[in-house]
Amino acid sequence: MIGITPQSLTHQMRGLRMPVTTELALQDALEEWLNSTGTAFEREVRMGPKDRIDFMVADTIGIEVKTRYPRRQIYRQLERYCEGDRLTGLILVTGTYLGLPDQIHGVPLFLVSLGRSAL
């Protein structure tokens, strides 16, 4: 995948059908998809003393996967990831509807809601 951006990844992921039964199942399905597209990524990247983001693409695009998790806690976790200058974009992939601002701490946020397309 040439010219990877948070926008291009979000656009492609919005058309996917992935399981939302468990977070691990969704992470594994997303990993399989990233591998199938030839996208280089790291999984479980440390973002702070207590935080690890699920996927890091192109060294600066974070992808966090959440299935059943309180909305407020999801937001707080995203907020911690956006501290500092490591991310150029953050994508939340979830089966839970969550209204998000356009950005947190200057980092653009993108939502991939799998509620309707989930298996």
Image (cartoon, grey):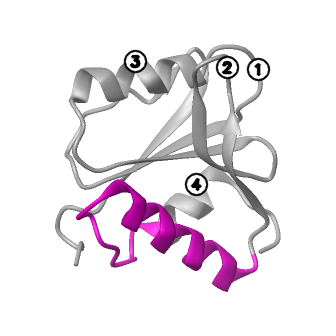
The answer to which quarter of the image holds residue 61 is top right
Please, what is the dominant secondary structure of the magenta stretch? helix
Q: Is residue 83 above or below residue 34?
A: above
Give the residue pinned by disc 3.
Answer: 76
| Front one among 21 and 101 | 21
Classed neighbour count for the residue bearing mark 2: other residues with Cα under 10 Å, few (<14), some (14–19), many (≥20):
few
How many angstroms separate mark 3 from mark 4 (CA)? Answer: 22 Å
- Name the secondary structure under disc 3: helix
Labels 3 & 4 near each other (Cβ < 8 A): no
Q: CA distance from mark 4 to mark 2?
A: 25 Å
Mark 1 is surrounded, within 10 Å at the Cα level, by few (under 14), some (14 to 19) or many (20 or more) other residues, namely few
Q: Earlier in the sequence, mark 4 or mark 2?
A: 4
Measured Cα–Cα span from mark 1 to mark 2: 13 Å
In this rendering, the label closer to the viewer, 4 or 2: 2
What residue is disc 2 on? 48
List x then y, in percent, for residue 91: 51, 46
Mark in front: 4 vs 1: 1
Quarter of the image with the C terminus in it: bottom left
**Magenta part of the protein: which range?**
13-38
Name the residue carrying label 1. 85
Label located before the other in sequence (1 or 2): 2
Pinpoint residue 99: horizontal percent, then vertical percent.
25, 34
Q: Amino acid at mark 4?
A: Gln
